């Protein structure tokens, strides 16, 4: 798919008060190790990301393999006050960037904490197949279309942790595009979920962010 804009951003869009309240609330909840894709148990059954904890489910080998790809801690959030604040920007970006993707559901938000040395390697948020969840009409048959990342930390409080994009359908696919536009606290970036991106290791302090994914039926 050819895109005129691979991402759309809003710098310092959310207030410091909102960001601080969100961080305070998320830190009051129990976090868990962040996963990638789906993890299965010994019977091959897919285990929900929400139900896995480092202590109960993941073996040492699982952890070692996982941390080659991603190392961070997360909290899942479903609070309506968060969606109400963020969703208008998603719709605006979808229109202004010219994507005009059809979507009708937003998954649980993921509050992410990157401590010293933690990172997330190259990945896309979209998967090979739509969700197969017949019991859940909000998910079943849908794919991730638009991803959102929100900076919740003051850039003075950490170093490293840069969000970077790689547009692999371009001729110069080896070039990496840093995204300093969203460094300021409260900044938002929206991008198609099939765009490759990563978070570089944090070299000082702690970086807090919020991500969410917006679903719709597959592109036609």
Image: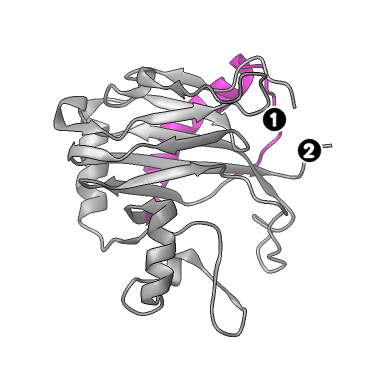
Q: Position of residue 121 (x, y in %)?
A: 44, 44
Q: Range of the magenta residues?
A: 76-105
In the picture, residue 74 is in which quadrant? bottom left
Element assignment for label 1? loop
Q: Is residue 50 one of those drawn in magenta?
A: no
Q: Which residue is found at the position 18% from the left and 33% from the top?
A: 158
- Quadrant position of the N terminus in the picture: top right
Q: How crowded is mark 2: few (under 14 residues within 10 Å), some or many (20 or more)?
A: few
Above or below, comparing residue 186 to residue 214 in the picture: above
Q: Is residue 98 one of those drawn in magenta?
A: yes
Q: Position of residue 118 (x, y in %)?
A: 29, 48
Query: Is there a contact, CB below 8 Å, between mark 1 and mark 2?
Result: yes
Q: Position of residue 24 (x, y in %)?
A: 19, 46
Mark 1 or mark 2, which has the lower sequence index? 1
Q: Which residue is found at the position 65% from the left and 41% from the top?
A: 104
Residue 101: assigned label: 1
Q: Residues within 10 Å of mark 1 (few under 14, many from 20)?
A: some
Residue 219: assigned label: 2
Q: Taking 144 as reference, is 157 left or right?
A: left
Q: Taking 6 as reference, is 119 left or right?
A: left
Above or below, comparing residue 97 to residue 47 in the picture: above
């Amino acid at each position: 798919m050819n895109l005129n804009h691979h991402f759309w951003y809003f710098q310092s869009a959310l207030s410091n008060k909102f960001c601080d309240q969100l961080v305070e609330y998320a830190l009051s909840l129990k976090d868990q190790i962040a996963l990638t894709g789906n993890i299965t148990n010994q019977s091959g059954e897919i285990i929900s990301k929400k139900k896995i904890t480092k202590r109960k489910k993941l073996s040492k080998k699982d952890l070692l393999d996982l941390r080659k790809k991603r190392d961070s801690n997360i909290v899942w959030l479903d609070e309506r006050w968060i969606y109400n604040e963020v969703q208008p920007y998603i719709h605006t970006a979808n229109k202004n960037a010219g994507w005009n993707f059809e979507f009708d559901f937003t998954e649980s938000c993921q509050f992410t904490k990157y401590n010293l040395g933690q990172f997330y390697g190259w990945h896309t948020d979209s998967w090979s197949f739509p969700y197969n969840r017949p019991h859940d009409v909000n998910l079943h048959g849908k794919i991730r279309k638009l991803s959102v990342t929100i900076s919740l930390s003051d850039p003075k409080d950490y170093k490293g942790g840069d969000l970077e994009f790689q547009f692999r359908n371009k001729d110069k696919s080896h070039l990496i595009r840093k995204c300093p536009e969203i460094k300021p606290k409260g900044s938002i970036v929206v991008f198609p979920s099939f765009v490759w991106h990563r978070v570089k290791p944090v070299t000082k302090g702690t970086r807090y962010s919020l991500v969410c994914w917006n679903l719709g039926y597959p592109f036609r």
